[in-house]
């Protein structure tokens, strides 16, 4: 059994490794990762590696491990290990097989791995193939490379192509698109709908209020509480902050990893 460990505490990592190898003596630890950024890079570079299960802490130094599974859409089963129980519901939305509270006990690991094996045995390879084929039919339509949005000014409807957008901001339920020429357009769509339609390679949602385009970013600076502040062009009227939970994903997006 090939296993990946995601844990940022050295002592907890050693204990978890010891317990797993004691319970599953033939298992192989193929990777030990300590942050969201490390995990994103490793999984992106090792897509062909066979992984049977991931043991993952939830609160890592640079964010929540959910970001890894939600951004890369990994299909590997996950056993979460954490000192907190408030993430249980979200854990089972990202391939969570079990949810173990620290300190992890040998009997709990044994039961979790047994549960994993039972789950796998329920489906033959042919059944799994048919399920995957069925799931593909419900995949969302691919994002348009250059979608057009509609801005309304008095009695005019003005088409706004995404390639002309520098950044978007929502304040007091008003969504404003700031164009590369510093022209401001008000769009009658929600931030969530706009985010879904924009090409992810060129636009990134840094927090609840802002979506920025790659071409608008002049530089990023370290900000307190493990966040980043961005200098945009055209400039924003306020300090634009990448939220702590999005920093790791943002840095990888800038590098073209996502």
Image (tube, rainbow, N blue to C red):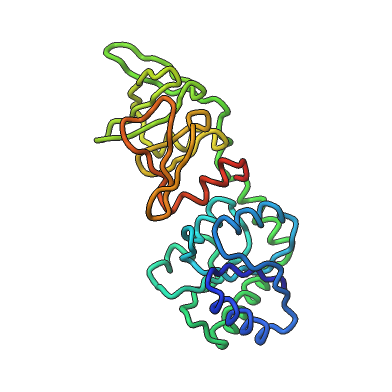
Q: Position of residue 101 (x, y in %)?
A: 46, 78
Q: Nearer the viewer, residue 120 or 53?
A: 53
In percent of the image, x 43 and y 23: which residue is there? Answer: 149
Q: Residue furthest top?
A: 155
Q: Nearer the viewer, residue 136 or 166?
A: 166
Q: Nearer the viewer, residue 216 or 92?
A: 216
In percent of the image, x 28 and y 31: which residue is there? Answer: 174
Q: Is residue 172 above or below residue 87?
A: above
Q: Quadrant of the C terminus?
A: top right
Q: Is residue 10 above or below residue 248?
A: below
Q: Quadrant of the N terminus?
A: bottom right
Q: Position of residue 113 (x, y in %)?
A: 62, 78
Q: Residue furthest left?
A: 172
Give the number of callouts: 0
Left or right of 226? Residue 1 is right
In percent of the image, x 32 and y 18: which residue is there? Answer: 152
Q: Nearer the viewer, residue 183 or 125?
A: 183
Q: Is residue 37 above or below residue 31?
A: above
Q: Position of residue 127 (x, y in %)?
A: 69, 61
Q: Position of residue 60 (x, y in %)?
A: 49, 64
In percent of the image, x 51 and y 69: which residue is there? Answer: 57
């Amino acid at each position: 059994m090939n296993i990946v460990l995601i844990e940022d505490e050295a002592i907890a990592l050693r204990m978890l490794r010891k317990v797993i190898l004691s319970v599953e003596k033939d298992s192989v630890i193929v990777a030990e990762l300590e942050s969201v950024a490390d995990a994103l890079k490793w999984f992106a570079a090792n897509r062909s590696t066979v992984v049977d299960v991931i043991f993952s802490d939830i609160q890592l130094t640079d964010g929540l491990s959910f970001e890894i599974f939600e951004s890369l859409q990994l299909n590997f089963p996950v056993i979460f290990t954490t000192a907190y129980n408030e993430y249980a519901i979200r854990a089972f939305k990202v391939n969570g097989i079990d949810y173990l509270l620290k300190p992890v006990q040998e009997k709990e690991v044994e039961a979790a791995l047994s549960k994993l094996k039972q789950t796998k045995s329920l489906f033959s390879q042919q059944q799994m193939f048919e399920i995957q084929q069925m799931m593909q039919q419900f995949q969302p339509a691919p994002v348009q490379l250059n979608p057009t949005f509609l801005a309304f000014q008095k009695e005019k409807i003005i088409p706004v192509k995404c390639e002309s957008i520098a950044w978007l901001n929502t304040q007091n339920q008003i969504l404003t698109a700031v164009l590369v020429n510093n022209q401001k357009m008000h769009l009658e769509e929600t931030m969530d709908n706009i985010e879904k339609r924009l090409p992810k390679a060129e636009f990134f949602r840094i927090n609840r209020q802002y979506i920025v385009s790659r071409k608008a970013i002049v530089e990023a600076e370290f900000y307190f509480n493990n966040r980043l502040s961005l200098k945009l062009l055209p400039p924003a009227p306020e300090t634009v902050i990448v939220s702590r939970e999005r920093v790791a994903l943002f840095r990888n997006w800038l590098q073209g990893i996502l």
